[in-house]
């Protein structure tokens, strides 16, 4: 008979505090400098060593996932709510607008998310999976209702909307045109007249 596995010990109080300090610092530094902010700067801002940061977040993607995972979960939940309460084309457009707003919360975020789209080893990939499945469901509903072109898939949608966020990052003068660009993308994927 094999002994029962020993359950993992919960992290010590100081380890939990350090993790929270790193996350708080990351929110501040990433908001100022974008997703490619120096991890050394985040550790310095948190008042911990770089080794402590890496102990909690072994990669930049792991740190970003910890910062953004709840937002991804919220977007997935919102998709389910919209699917139950709104017509298909409205649900998809509203969700994509929220996705766009979220993808521009931090400079460089759109590029970071798109870079992990096919990287199943990335914590961001795993964290985004529920969100990707949710938009696929909204897209399928909109296509079945005849409002969205059948050849559009979820990768197309996420790439197009992320591109708007990326453009705003690269050329801040285009940030004011974000809504206009979003309207053009929606007109391009829908089957009806622009509106």
Image (cartoon, helix red, strand yellow):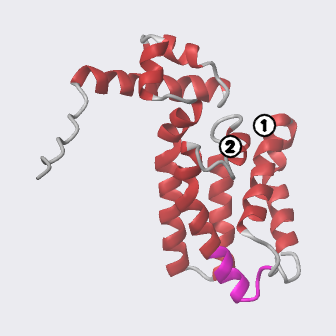
Disc nearer the start of the sequence (2/1):
2
Q: Nearer the viewer, residue 60 or 186?
A: 60
Relative to 136, is 103 above or below?
A: above
Residue occupying the point 72% across, 48% down: 114
Residue occupying the point 60% across, 27% down: 30
The quadrant in which the C terminus is found is bottom right
Mark 2 Cα-neighbour bin, 10 Å: few <14, some 14–19, many ≥20: many
Disc 2 secondary structure class: loop
Q: Which residues are magenta?
A: 138-148
The reply to whether discs 2 and 1 touch (Cβ–Cβ < 8 Å) is: yes
Q: Which residue is mark 1?
A: 169
Q: Quadrant of residue 92?
A: bottom right
Q: CA distance from mark 2 to mark 1?
A: 8 Å
Residue 186 image label: none
Relative to 56, is 84 above or below?
A: below
Q: Position of residue 132 (x, y in %)?
A: 61, 62
Q: Nearer the viewer, residue 167 or 62?
A: 62
Q: Which residue is mark 2?
A: 104
Q: How many marks?
A: 2
* Residue 145 is one of the magenta-drawn residues: yes
Q: Quadrant of residue 104?
A: top right
Judge whether residue 91 can be spotted in this image: no
Q: Position of residue 163 (x, y in %)?
A: 80, 50
Instruction: Tell me: 49 left or right of 167.
Output: left
Q: Position of residue 72 (x, y in %)?
A: 53, 53
Residue occupying the point 53% across, 25% down: 28
Q: Nearer the viewer, residue 183 or 64?
A: 64
Judge whether residue 97 can be spotted in this image: yes
Residue occupying the point 22% across, 34% down: 10
């Amino acid at each position: 008979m094999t002994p029962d596995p020993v359950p993992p010990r919960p992290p010590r109080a100081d380890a939990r505090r350090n993790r929270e300090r790193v996350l708080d610092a990351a929110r501040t530094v990433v908001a100022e400098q974008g997703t490619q902010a120096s991890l050394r700067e985040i550790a310095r801002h948190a008042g911990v060593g770089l080794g402590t940061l890496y102990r909690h977040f072994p990669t930049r993607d792991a740190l970003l996932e910890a910062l953004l995972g709840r937002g991804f979960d919220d977007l997935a939940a919102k998709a389910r709510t919209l699917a139950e309460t709104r017509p298909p084309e409205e649900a998809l457009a509203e969700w994509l607008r929220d996705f766009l707003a979220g993808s521009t919360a931090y400079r460089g975020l759109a590029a970071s998310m798109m870079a992990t789209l096919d990287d199943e080893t990335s914590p961001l990939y795993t964290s985004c999976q529920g969100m990707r499945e949710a938009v696929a469901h909204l897209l399928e509903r909109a296509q079945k209702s005849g409002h969205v072109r059948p050849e559009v898939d979820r990768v197309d949608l996420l790439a197009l909307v992320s591109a708007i966020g990326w453009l705003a990052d690269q050329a801040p003068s285009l940030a004011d045109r974000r809504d206009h660009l979003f309207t053009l993308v929606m007109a391009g994927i829908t089957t009806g007249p622009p509106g």
